[in-house]
Image (tube, helix red, strand yellow):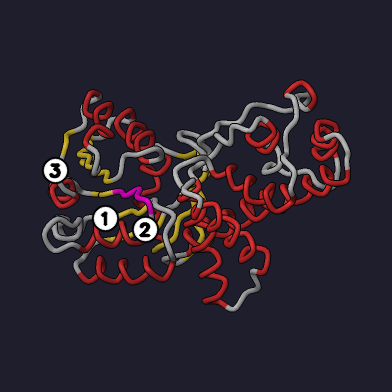
């Protein structure tokens, strides 16, 4: 199938590669042409705009930083995807986007006879999880393309539902991360050994997948694991906005949102999101540091790029 892929950065690039390896013909675009070099070496064609990528494609995927980038990439009258896609084509957004924004964009697509799905992701291809919203028949039609990139494919419901599911998982993960840091700071201020505490938590009521990232990323003082602070802060903020829209409580999330924004104000936006620990450490007047040998028992290495 002739496919377009717009946004071939950290997440989009390996997804696009999966589609090429499955035998599809890809036309790719990114603001940084060098982000497409490896894909073009595998047979993809470069397009100088989202519009040009769409003109050559039956289905176009996007994987972009956020709602503003998606809206511009889709609706710009001169360079946008929708100006290039023909009626009967399809648009699939794999960005972590705002449900309300995407519903509006989906309406514009359908008005021009273009089918649409929201399909945000978690993890890394080819084993990642994809959460899909949109028309059930459209989902069934394009599910084989999604299966090229992900192992766990969930149809969530109507348009925007995939984004709702993704924002809930992001809320849980990053609010949990900040809560875990606060718990560790209590222990550190009270004088117990962090290495021992880090061995206790995974086999106690405090166990979580999120916690397991802390010893590697924070105790070392490197703060390198995971997505960038800017991306995480964007996702958490969108989740809090969604809570406000639907009238759901988000007290812990709002506090997490504040801490993430404080870290961004320090100029750390392009660092790994665990750098937010430095804000809480400053508040507590103590650093969360421990030698690797003291907490390594029972931990498995995690892909640091997991979103």
Classify 10 Å Cα crowding around label 3: few (below 14), some (14-19), many (20 and above). few
- In the figure, 248 relative to 275: above or below? below
Residue 159: say if magenta.
no
Residue identified by numbered label 2: 117
Q: Quadrant of residue 239?
A: bottom right
29 relative to 199 in the view: left or right: left
The crowd level at tag 2 (other Cα within 10 Å; few <14, some 14-19, many 20+) is many
Image position, residue 4 (x, y; %) = 23, 44
Q: Earlier in the sequence, mark 1 or mark 2?
A: 1
User: Residue 162's spot in the image, x, y percent?
Assistant: 48, 59
User: Residue 48's mark?
Assistant: 3
Mark 1 highlights which residue? 90
Identified at 36% across, 32% down, the residue is: 18
Q: Nearer the viewer, residue 99 or 202?
A: 202
Which mark, by number, is residue 139? none
Furthest toward the front, the residue is 285
Q: Who is closer to the viewer here, 129 or 290?
A: 290
Residue drawn where x is 25% and y is 70% of the image = 108
User: Which quadrant would residue 137 be assigned to in this image?
Assistant: bottom left
N-terminal label among 1 and 3: 3
Q: Tell whether label 3 touches label 1 (CB within 8 Å).
A: no
Q: Are marks 1 and 2 in contact (CB under 8 Å)?
A: yes
Name the residue: 86% across, 42% down: 204
Bounds of the magenta segment: 61-65
Give the Cα separation between the discs numbered 1 and 3: 20 Å
Which residue extends farthest bottom? 247
Q: Nearer the viewer, residue 255 or 147?
A: 255
């Amino acid at each position: 199938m002739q496919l377009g892929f717009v946004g071939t950065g950290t997440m989009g690039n390996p997804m696009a590669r999966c589609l090429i390896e499955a035998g599809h013909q890809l036309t790719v675009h990114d603001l940084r042409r060098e982000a497409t070099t490896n894909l073009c070496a595998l047979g993809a064609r470069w397009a100088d705009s989202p519009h040009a990528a769409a003109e050559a494609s039956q289905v176009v995927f996007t994987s972009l930083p956020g709602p503003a980038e998606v809206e511009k990439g889709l609706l710009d009258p001169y360079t946008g995807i929708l100006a290039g896609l023909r009626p009967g084509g399809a648009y699939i957004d794999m960005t972590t986007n705002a449900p309300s924004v995407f519903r509006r964009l989906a309406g514009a697509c359908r008005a021009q006879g273009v089918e649409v799905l929201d399909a945000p992701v978690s993890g890394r291809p080819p084993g990642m999880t994809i959460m899909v919203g949109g028309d059930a028949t459209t989902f069934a039609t394009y599910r084989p393309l999604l299966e090229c990139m992900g192992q766990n494919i969930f149809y969530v419901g109507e348009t925007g539902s995939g984004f709702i599911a993704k924002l809930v998982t992001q809320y849980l993960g990053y609010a949990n991360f900040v809560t875990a840091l606060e718990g560790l700071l209590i222990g550190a201020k009270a004088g117990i050994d962090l290495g021992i505490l880090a061995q206790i938590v995974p086999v106690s009521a405090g166990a979580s997948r999120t916690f397991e990232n802390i010893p590697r990323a924070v105790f070392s003082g490197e703060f390198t694991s995971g997505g960038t602070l800017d991306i995480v802060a964007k996702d958490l903020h969108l989740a809090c906005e969604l809570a406000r829209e639907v009238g759901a409580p988000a007290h812990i999330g709002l506090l997490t949102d504040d801490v993430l924004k404080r870290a961004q104000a320090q100029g750390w936006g392009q660092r790994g999101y665990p750098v937010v620990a430095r804000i809480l450490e400053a508040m507590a007047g103590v650093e969360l540091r421990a030698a690797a040998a003291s907490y390594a028992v029972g931990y498995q290495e995690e892909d640091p790029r997991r979103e």
